[in-house]
């Protein structure tokens, strides 16, 4: 009984309810979209192979194992029933199991977005700390200006500018070779050649993610550090004669970073779905690009699967942020256990 | 204090002049903010006065094909300072004519979002109980779903021949952040003396919201509105970029979409069709972000006096 009242249980239930709500909401939303996959296929068959409408309908219906004329609620209970048994269904357009497809796309997005987020967070926090420490100096002014400028520019604009300035005008990067996820013909495997190839193709999306988010980290870290500097324990630590270096890393930096770590955890959930444009632009074979493709083809089951991944990652990252904050900040942990 | 103790009020023109001067000072004091203001003013002029001066070129101009060239694309020249697009049309004319719809839709989204968020936030905070719970849980739900993927699906459902529909849709996805802030502010103000006094005097929800609660957070609301406008522009251009919104010329987002399809990224001579709108969008968004610095000074009297 104690478990049922615990904080963990409450968070868990809330998470499951949220995921269910998102799945349900998107299930009906997706089926409200004009045009359905069968209709698209029928049009294609009639145009390409010159079939009559009846023939095309029959062929399309057998191909898809999906009947749009069935009542929506029945389709929904059917889908939820399968989902509970771990079956995400098959892709409507290419007949492969959706779970298999998700496992194929997800690593690309996790790798590129994760690397981008990690780099921008690490550098953003370090630079922001330095900005606050030497606030008012030329370094601070310069960095604040740079951060405000790149913070204000949309990510796809940054991506297009990289392509146009570095790739097209100056020709310093062979951007044609860097599109896609990997070069065709390079054998996937744990070889140096393949890993270098992967990195080469990840450079464009990763640097876009880094540039578009580092400004935000820098500015937040700076303001968080400045408010930490005024805390009593910093004055006390300084009075104890601790070295500036130790003060900066162990006392100021670590405490100022707290709110940012929470934001980092939350943003992990959001970037999984937020990379649609960048991946499309760079032809990167991740979740975002495939969501766009699935929407274009009205591939209901694939769309549904991607939304499931997005919902789960948002919920998990929120829980993670919560737990992480408790681990990092003992003050929060204390109040929580007192509540329980 | 009786009326006689009050200092004599200066005449109305003097007061107006002082207020205007005060605002102007607040506007110019923050250099970055003032640059942002100038940037916004530039784009407003460009898209309102510009179309009166520069005629729109909708038809292809095949006669502008340069000898030896395979496409009508052209880099900047004396006659066409931003170059020509894939149909040989003047890119400057598309920049001048293609910003208005985008900017207006973004501003509509900002205003609509702010109105809805303030109304719902005030209602949730002041009424409490059941209405609060309903509004808050809907808001939290919307905040949980990543907006852009959802927008991709929603955008195909609605017809966007009228851009107002797009603004409404974006507002539906955007109100919760500000609503939560307004609600929290209302909650914390509710127990303060002057608001309790207003309640006791039975001044009504409308009066309490507009007179007692909102002035306290006007700076936050205005800055939030600017960021909503920026986000709306990001989303609209993003949708166009993916070719999802039914697209109509002239429009900056459309230039990027069509330019990419027509191979504008293939060389330095052709890329101006994309570079021009990309720079316009980047500069407009940057101006918005910088302008918020000035807005904070204008609407926050403490900052105004403290400097």
Image (cartoon, helix red, strand yellow):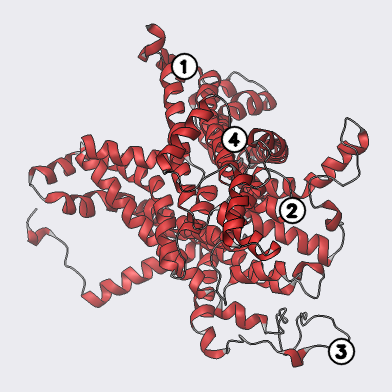
Q: Is residue A255 left or right of residue A204?
A: left
Element class at badge 2: loop
Q: Residues within 10 Å of mark 4 (few under 14, many from 20)?
A: some
- What is the chain identity of the residue bearing mark 3? B
Q: Nearer the viewer, mark 1 or mark 4?
A: 4
Q: What residue sits 42% from the left and 53% below the top?
A: B224
Q: Nearer the viewer, residue A23 or A340?
A: A23
Q: Tell me which label, 2 or 1, sits earlier in the chain.
A: 2
Residue B191 visible somewhere in the drawing? yes
- Cα–Cα gap, marks 1 and 4: 42 Å
Q: Nearer the viewer, residue B286 or A298?
A: A298
Element class at badge 4: loop
Q: Is residue B265 left or right of residue B175?
A: right
Quadrant of the snapshot with the C terminus of chain B: bottom left
Name the residue tied to disc 1: A333
Q: Tell me which label, 1 or 4, sits earlier in the chain.
A: 4
- Cα–Cα gap, marks 4 and 3: 57 Å
- What is the chain identity of the residue bearing mark 1? A
Name the residue tied to disc 4: A89
Q: Nearer the viewer, residue B63 or B203?
A: B63
Name the residue tied to disc 2: A282
Outermost residue, top side:
A1
Name the residue tied to disc 3: B67
Question: Compared to A59, does B10 lie above or below?
Answer: below
Q: Residues within 10 Å of mark 2 (few under 14, many from 20)?
A: many
């Amino acid at each position: 009984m104690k478990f049922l009242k615990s904080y963990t249980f409450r968070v868990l239930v809330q998470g499951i309810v949220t995921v269910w709500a998102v799945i349900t909401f998107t299930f009906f939303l997706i089926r409200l979209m004009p045009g359905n996959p069968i209709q698209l296929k029928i049009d294609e068959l009639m145009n390409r192979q010159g079939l009559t409408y009846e023939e095309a309908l029959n062929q399309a219906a057998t191909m898809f194992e999906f009947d749009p004329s069935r009542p929506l609620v029945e389709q929904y209970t059917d889908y939820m029933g399968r989902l509970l048994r771990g079956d995400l269904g098959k892709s409507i357009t290419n007949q492969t199991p959706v779970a298999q497809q998700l496992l194929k796309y997800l690593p690309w997005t996790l790798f590129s977005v994760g690397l981008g987020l990690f780099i921008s967070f690490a550098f953003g926090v370090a630079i922001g700390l330095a900005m606050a420490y030497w606030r008012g100096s030329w370094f601070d002014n310069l960095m604040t200006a740079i951060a405000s400028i790149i913070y204000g520019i949309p990510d796809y604009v940054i991506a297009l500018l990289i392509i146009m300035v570095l790739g097209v005008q100056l020709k310093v990067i062979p951007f044609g070779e860097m599109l896609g996820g990997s070069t065709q013909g390079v054998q996937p495997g744990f070889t140096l050649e393949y890993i270098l190839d992967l990195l080469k193709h990840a450079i464009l999306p990763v640097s876009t993610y880094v540039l578009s988010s580092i400004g935000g980290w820098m500015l937040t870290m700076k303001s968080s550090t400045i408010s930490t500097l005024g805390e009593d324990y910093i004055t006390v630590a300084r009075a104890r004669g601790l070295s500036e270096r130790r003060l900066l890393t162990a006392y100021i930096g670590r405490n100022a970073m707290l709110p940012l770590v929470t934001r980092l955890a939350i943003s992990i959930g959001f970037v999984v779905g937020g990379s649609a444009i960048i991946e499309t632009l760079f032809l990167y074979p991740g979740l975002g690009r495939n969501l766009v493709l699935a929407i274009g083809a009205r591939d209901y089951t694939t769309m549904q699967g991607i939304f499931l991944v997005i919902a789960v990652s948002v919920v998990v990252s929120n829980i993670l942020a919560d737990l992480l904050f408790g681990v990092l900040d003992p003050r929060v942990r204390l109040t929580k256990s007192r509540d329980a | 204090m009786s009326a006689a103790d009050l200092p004599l009020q200066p005449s109305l023109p003097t007061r107006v002049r002082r207020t205007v001067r005060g605002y102007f000072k607040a506007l110019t004091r923050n250099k970055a903010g003032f640059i942002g203001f100038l940037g916004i003013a530039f784009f407003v002029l460009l898209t309102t006065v510009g179309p009166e001066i520069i005629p729109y070129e909708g038809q292809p101009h095949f006669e502008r094909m340069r000898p030896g060239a395979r496409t009508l694309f052209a880099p900047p020249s004396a006659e066409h300072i931003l170059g020509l697009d894939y149909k040989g049309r003047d890119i400057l004319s598309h920049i001048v004519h293609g910003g208005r719809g985008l900017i207006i839709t973004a501003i509509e989204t900002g205003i609509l979002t702010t109105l809805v968020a303030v109304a719902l936030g005030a209602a949730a905070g002041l009424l409490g109980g059941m209405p609060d719970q309903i509004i808050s849980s809907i808001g939290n739900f919307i905040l949980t779903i990543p907006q852009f993927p959802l927008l991709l699906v929603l955008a195909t459902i609605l017809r966007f021949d009228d851009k107002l529909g797009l603004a409404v849709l974006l507002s539906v996805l955007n109100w919760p952040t500000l609503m939560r802030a307004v609600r929290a502010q209302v909650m914390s103000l509710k127990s303060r003396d002057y608001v309790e006094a207003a309640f006791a005097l039975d001044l009504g929800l409308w009066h309490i919201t507009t007179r007692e609660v909102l002035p306290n957070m006007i700076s936050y609301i205005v800055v939030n509105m600017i960021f909503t406008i920026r986000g709306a522009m990001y989303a609209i251009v993003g949708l166009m970029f993916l070719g999802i919104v039914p697209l109509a010329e002239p429009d900056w987002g459309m230039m990027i979409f069509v330019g990419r399809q027509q191979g504008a990224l293939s060389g330095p001579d052709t890329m101006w069709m994309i570079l021009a709108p990309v720079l316009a969008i980047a500069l407009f968004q940057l101006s918005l972000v910088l302008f918020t610095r000035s807005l904070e000074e204008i609407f926050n009297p403490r900052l105004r006096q403290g400097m």
